[in-house]
Image (cartoon, rainbow, N blue to C red):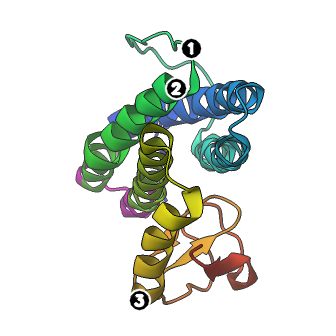
Amino acid sequence: MDSIIGSQTEKNALFTFAGESMACVRYELYGERAKEEGYLRIADFFMEAARQERQHARRMYRILIGGAVAVRWELRQPEFTETVSNITQSIENEQTEWQTTYPGFADTAEQEGFPQLAVIWRAIAVAEKYHEKRFRAFLQNVRTGAELEAFYHTLIDSARKNAAVRCGSCGYVCEDGIIPAFCPVCGMPPEYFKILS
């Protein structure tokens, strides 16, 4: 792969590394708050999502060469409030990442001659899409007071019909059920993939 130094792709990789690192810490804090409020399953998922965001950050870190990069970002400070608000913020962030940010970064990478990085960003976007779906399921459960299992089984059944499999390390989802030789996000071998549940 050609050097990304000086490219917009380099800035996008740094942005992704920073954003995914912050998401990891934010989800850990959200998980602690959910646990305090008695939402143990939601707390567990926040911690799972935090581990997956950490893997996304690690993947971007491996791409970065080092040295100074001049960037100007406007970052919104996270709010640590009650769990419903934390889930709502998480849904918005995940949706923006998978619908806009990472597909845009992938397009830029392709235009600049880095197709391998485009594949990585598109794969991360898939993981973020499933984070959003799971957060929406939890939000629905909290708002309606319905049993989590009853609502969540709908999502699980849908995944099983499609035979989707997920990487246990980073959260990437193969929607067609075909397990790759290695995960395109974190590089883990096939044994890390399980039926989406």
Which residue in the structure is indicated by mark 2?
A: 86
Residue 5 spot, x, y in % from top left:
47, 35
Tell me which residue sits at (35%, 33%) in the image. 92
Residue 117 highlighted magenta (yes or no): yes
Image mark for residue 81: 1
Q: Say what amino acid the circle numbered 2 marks.
A: Asn
The answer to which image quadrant residue 65 occupies is: top right
Q: CA distance from mark 3 to mark 1?
A: 37 Å
Which residue in the structure is indicated by mark 3?
A: 161
Tell me which residue sits at (23%, 51%) in the image. 111
Q: Relative to 173, is 137 above or below? A: above
| Marks 3 and 2 close (CB-CB < 8 Å) | no
Q: CA distance from mark 1 to mark 2?
A: 6 Å
Secondary structure beneath label 2: helix
Closer to the camera in the image, 53 or 16: 53
Image mark for residue 108: none
Q: Relative to 165, is 35 above or below? A: above
The answer to which image quadrant residue 95 occupies is: top left
Callout 3 crowding tier (Cα within 10 Å): few <14, some 14–19, many ≥20: few
Q: CA distance from mark 3 to mark 2?
A: 31 Å
Q: Is residue 44 visible?
A: yes
| Marks 1 and 2 close (CB-CB < 8 Å) | yes
Tell me which residue sits at (66%, 80%) in the image. 194
Closer to the camera in the image, 89 or 75: 89
Q: Relative to 33, is 142 above or below? A: below
Secondary structure beneath label 1: loop
